[in-house]
Amino acid sequence: MKKILCDFRFLLFLAAAAFIYIQIESEDQCTSQLRTLIDQISLQQGQIVSLEGKGLGRLIDKEQVPVAAVVIMACNRADYLERTVKSVLKYQSSVASKFPLFVSQDGSHPAVKEKALSYDQLTYMQHLDYEPVHTERPGELIAYYKIARHYKWALDGLFYKHNFSRVIILEDDMEIAPDFFDYFESTAALLDKDKSIMAVSSWNDNGQKQFVHDPKVLYRSDFFPGLGWMLARSTWDELSPKWPKAYWDDWLRLKENHKDRQFIRPEVCRTYNFGEHGSSLGQFFKQYLEPIKLNDVLVDWKSMDLNYLMEDKYIKHFADIVKKAKPIRGTDLVLKARNIGGDVRIQYNDQPDFERIARQFGIFEEWKDGVPRTAYKGIVVFRYQITQRIFLVGPGSLVQLGVSDS
């Protein structure tokens, strides 16, 4: 009798185990079928969808108001993405509640999706866009159009779906400095208080090792730097409805779009761009990007008074620095600058003249919509011989600053 009872209990146990297994398998199959159905609908209708791999609520402290969401824009470079995420997590982990991390992937490259979903510390977003791209000019790269669509979709989602007040945009080929998050937390107040500041950037186009020195120095610029930048929702409210089809960064550099607002940038970069291979096809990489100095000093931003960067104070602050620089003219400008101990200023007459002088020193020659890269009021500043500052001064710059040309 006892043997029969034991056999019966054993059979009941097996039946229960089989029932649970069938339920789990059935649930997994339903989930798989649901995902397949979503994918099929998206493919058929050409929709743009978002699939978040990790629960956002789990990653955000409900008692901590985030300073900014941080989004890494990715596409098809899994190895680059891994390097970027590792760099960000190295410094983000201790401030994760202030800076929730996202990866937004454009397209369905499986290795990128797998890599992003392998991290518990971030939220994954996927942009699937099946609308055909029609370029406006023959020979244009479709990539620039797809990038612009991806940016709009991701920023709309972070500002309007997730309701962040600020977003920091990184790309999948960047490493960050140790004080990256402290820098953005300290400059967030400037972005809120001073509406003449359109964005805060971590990048200096002339940030090569030979042209920088002081990691504490920040500047205002009329030229949008990009490459690691923070934007407020109020500004996105204005930009989103008219976002361009392509070349979004150059579009932001047009006066009709930035409307004479300016950008905060550091002397020493807080991001390093290692992406030699990408949609820009390595343009300028060896000359301008590879030699960039990534800040390696922990600056105590919380103890620094950054009010000098406010619009009403900065023009006098900058004018006082330029005023003290010794004017030099004529030929052999590099030699003359080398023979002067302190700061110098060099007048240029127009864009070709600027390009000629910039070429002599080795800084960026490029202009966009009448503004040289990094310029403020037509003035480009960079270091020379370690500490010396060179100011390339436009024809109307000193008048705008209220400085006499003597």
Image (cartoon, rainbow, N blue to C red):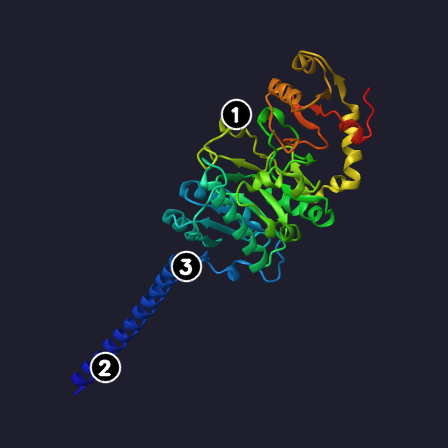
- Real-space Cα distance between discs 1 and 2? 77 Å
Q: Earlier in the sequence, mark 2 or mark 3?
A: 2
> Where 398 falls versus 263 (above or below)?
above
> Where 19 falls versus 405 (above or below)?
below
Quadrant of the image containing the C terminus: top right
- Real-space Cα distance between discs 2 and 3? 54 Å
Give the crowd class for mark 3: few <14, some 14-19, many >=20 residues within 10 Å. few
Give the crowd class for mark 2: few <14, some 14-19, many >=20 residues within 10 Å. few
Element marked by disc 3: helix
**For the residues bearing labels 1 and 2, Cβ distance under 8 angstroms:** no
Which mark is drawn over residue 287? Answer: 1
Q: Position of residue 305 (x, y in %)?
A: 74, 42
Q: Position of residue 236 (x, y in %)?
A: 62, 51
Element marked by disc 1: helix
Q: Position of residue 20 (x, y in %)?
A: 30, 73
Give the crowd class for mark 1: few <14, some 14-19, many >=20 residues within 10 Å. few
In the picture of the structure, the residue carrying the numbered disc 3 is 45
Q: Earlier in the sequence, mark 1 or mark 3?
A: 3
Q: Amino acid at mark 2?
A: Arg
Which mark is drawn over residue 148? Answer: none
Of circles 1 and 2, the one toward us is 1
In the picture of the structure, the residue carrying the numbered disc 2 is 9
Q: Amino acid at mark 3?
A: Gln
Of circles 1 and 3, the one toward us is 3
Of circles 2 and 3, the one toward us is 3
Quadrant of the image containing the N terminus: bottom left
**For the residues bearing labels 2 and 3, Cβ distance under 8 angstroms:** no
Q: Nearer the viewer, residue 281 or 56?
A: 281
Q: Dividing the picture into quarters, in which one does residue 66 lie?
A: bottom right
Q: Position of residue 150 (x, y in %)?
A: 50, 49
